[in-house]
Amino acid sequence: MKVYIESYGCTFNKADGQIIAGNLKENGIDLVDSIEEADVVIVNTCYVKLPTENKVTYRIQKLQKDFPDKKIIVGGCMVEIDPEKLNKVAPEASWIGPHQLNKSFDVVEATYCGDVVREVGFSKESKVNVPKVMDDSLIHIIQICEGCLGACTFCCTRFARGPLNSYPIEDIKDEAKRAIENGACEIQLTAQDTAAFGRDSGEKLSDLIKEVANLDGDFRVRVGMMHPKNILNDVDEIIDAMKHPKVYNFIHLPIQSGSDKVLSDMRRGHTVEQYLDIVSKFKTEIPDLTLAVDIIVGYPTEDDDDFDATVKLLEEIKPSLIHLSKYQHREGAISSSLKEIPHAVMKKRSKLLSEIKSQITEDENKELVGSCQKVLVIEKGSKGGFIAKTDSYIPVIVDEAELGSFVDVKITQATATYLRSELIN
């Protein structure tokens, strides 16, 4: 039996795909790199945004049409968020819910034999120190917790991932240690909200970061997305932990809107002033910080004044990365009962923010032209050369380098998305 797996969406879901692959490999299943070779195809879905929903739905339908002899299994968030639609799209497909990954082999074996098996529902099974098949030996993803403490009105992912379930620091540390010993040079700590880590177990994110960063070896740690409301009570200790030289000077801190009214409508649990205070503390203590933010354009209650407040916020904090999304209703989300704002208004606002985004990020990167940076080479470039990361997690194109090595470069050119460099001899 041969199985092909494709995963969509976030880093966390990518790691779920690695766990599915690990479970299958441990049980003697042959994993292949093409659909043509496979007997069973697993589509590990993402469902966070409507375009992604449409993409994975189309993909499942196309697989059934183009490869009618293949057995199809659907995994990921779609299984828990929208089983009704999934059942219509693929009535004969088996399912692996995101909390049932340890049953992957059982589902694959039964499906291959002609049964339709659907393993769903929540579980407290740990996703640390389990067999994985990594896509990249240099970058190792560790899921530090699953679920969240939020109640954001626009979100459907929380219905798939469930309540917070943090994994023990010692287990996470053990997996990171083995990964580094096996050649990993970047450890990615990921979750729906890394700042929520330990709120259910009594442990703390700041302690976790220090424990991993203090492991032996030459590597970097990237800390994943943090919800502002869950940083508030631990911000000073998290900053102290992130000052460690092995931790990237990078935070992903979504704000979604610059309007307190809209933040309240979204049930974000924090104010703009609190957000600005967090950002100010980080930038004061970590001057070379790369700040990544998320913005939702056109939330149903967003008026012109609210949008102007978002523009003002971005111009004030000047984030290095801006993830911009047009609001769209999501299955089960509270805000889906609200009337969407006119499409033309949303399009106009999105266009303006896109222009602001490009200008801010390009200006930020241009300030680095002429500077000398120590960068970590992590992957081959799709158009030649290599992609490296600065200590601030900014991508740099390096012409000649050895994967997994640290090299000194001089920045020669900047765009809104990356830097170009030349090696310093």
Image (cartoon, helix red, strand yellow):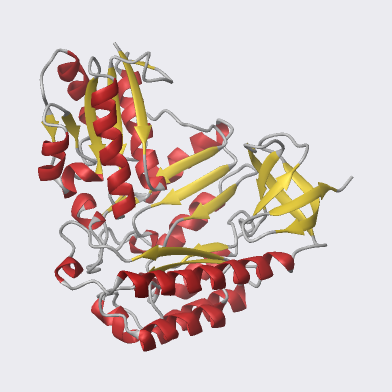
Left or right: 98, with 421 as reference point: left
Query: Residue 297, can we see it?
Result: no
Quadrant for the N terminus in the image? top left
What residue is rendered at 50% in x and 50% in y? 212
Where residue 190 sits in the image (x, y, percent)? 41, 51
Q: As rendered, which of 143 and 88 lies closer to the eye?
A: 88
Where residue 418 sits in the image (x, y, percent)? 65, 55
What residue is rendered at 44% in x and 38% in y? 175
Where residue 273 sits in the image (x, y, percent)? 42, 87
Q: Residue furthest right?
A: 425
What is the total number of numbered labels drawn onto the structure image? Answer: 0
Quick check: 361 above or below 1?
below
Q: As rendered, which of 315 and 289 lies closer to the eye?
A: 315
Left or right: 104, with 255 as reference point: left
What residue is rendered at 50% in x and 34% in y? 178
Query: Residue 360, can we see it?
Result: yes
Left or right: 228, with 117 as reference point: right
Q: As rendered, which of 165 and 370 lies closer to the eye?
A: 370
What residue is rendered at 74% in x and 51% in y? 420
Where residue 21 sits in the image (x, y, percent)? 35, 27
Which quadrant of the view contains residue 419?
Answer: bottom right
Which quadrant of the view contains residue 324?
Answer: bottom left
Quadrant for the C terminus in the image? top right
Quick check: 118 above or below 189?
above
